[in-house]
Amino acid sequence: MTADERRTLTETRDRIRAEFLFSRENRPPSTGRGIHHCALICADVRTTVDWYQNLAGFPVTVLFENRDLAGSTHFFFDVGAGNHLAFFDLPGVDPGPYQEVLGGLHHLCISVSEQHWHQIKNRLDERGADYMLESGTSIYTSDPDGTRIEFIHDPLGRMYGHDTM
């Protein structure tokens, strides 16, 4: 990227910030109550449950048949703060490999305590899993289906020293 291209992008970001970003005291309240769930597709229910419950430490809370596809399983993990991560398997459907596409998922970032962050890192090491450490607070890895996951030990509402709320 050239310096001129970067400067143009910075100017665009500054214009968007000036138009849409309100100070906390002037920001309108959100109409949302929180993330009910984020739904992803998996190839194998058991492998996914093992990874998210036994490696990440997120307990599976329910498994039931998906109302939209006979034989498909819909299941949820508790990722804290009243939020759930949900999965579907799609028997008989080939969704293809994970891809980064416009409108698609880049990565999912889940806040964990620093203690749990170290435990997750140790379990990744024990399994010989690939991961990348960033800024001393983030672990980037992929789940069994290639979905990129970030475990961050910054608390909710903070990232790398910035308030996000």
Image (tube, grey):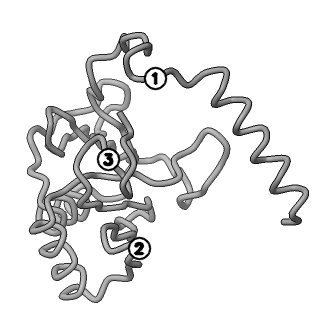
Kind of residue indicated by mark 1: Ser
Residue shown at 22% from the left, 37% from the top: 84
Kind of residue indicated by mark 3: Arg
Q: Residues within 10 Å of mark 1 (few under 14, many from 20)?
A: few
Residue of label 3: 158
Q: Residues within 10 Å of mark 3 (few under 14, many from 20)?
A: few
Q: Residue 10 — which label?
A: none
Q: Secondary structure at mark 2?
A: strand
Q: CA distance from mark 3 to mark 1?
A: 16 Å
Instruction: Name the spot of residue 154 as percent of width and height, x first.
Output: 26, 56
First of labels 3, 2 by sequence position: 2
Residue shown at 69% from the left, 29% from the top: 16
Q: Which image quadrant is residue 141 in? A: bottom left
Q: Secondary structure at mark 1?
A: loop
Q: Residue 134 — which label?
A: 2
Instruction: Name the spot of residue 74 as percent of width and height, x first.
Output: 25, 38
Q: Are marks 3 and 2 in contact (CB under 8 Å)?
A: no
Q: CA distance from mark 2 to mark 1?
A: 29 Å
First of labels 3, 1 by sequence position: 1
Instruction: Name the spot of residue 146 as percent of width and height, x first.
Output: 45, 65
Residue of label 1: 23
Looking at the image, residue 46 sits to the left or right of residue 129; the answer is: left
Q: In front here: 60 or 7?
A: 7
First of labels 2, 1 by sequence position: 1
Q: How many marks?
A: 3
Q: Is residue 35 above or below residue 152?
A: above
Looking at the image, residue 141 sits to the left or right of residue 21; the answer is: left
Residue shown at 14% from the left, 59% from the top: 113
Kind of residue indicated by mark 2: Glu
Viewer-nearest of labels 2 and 1?
A: 1
Q: CA distance from mark 3 to mark 2?
A: 15 Å
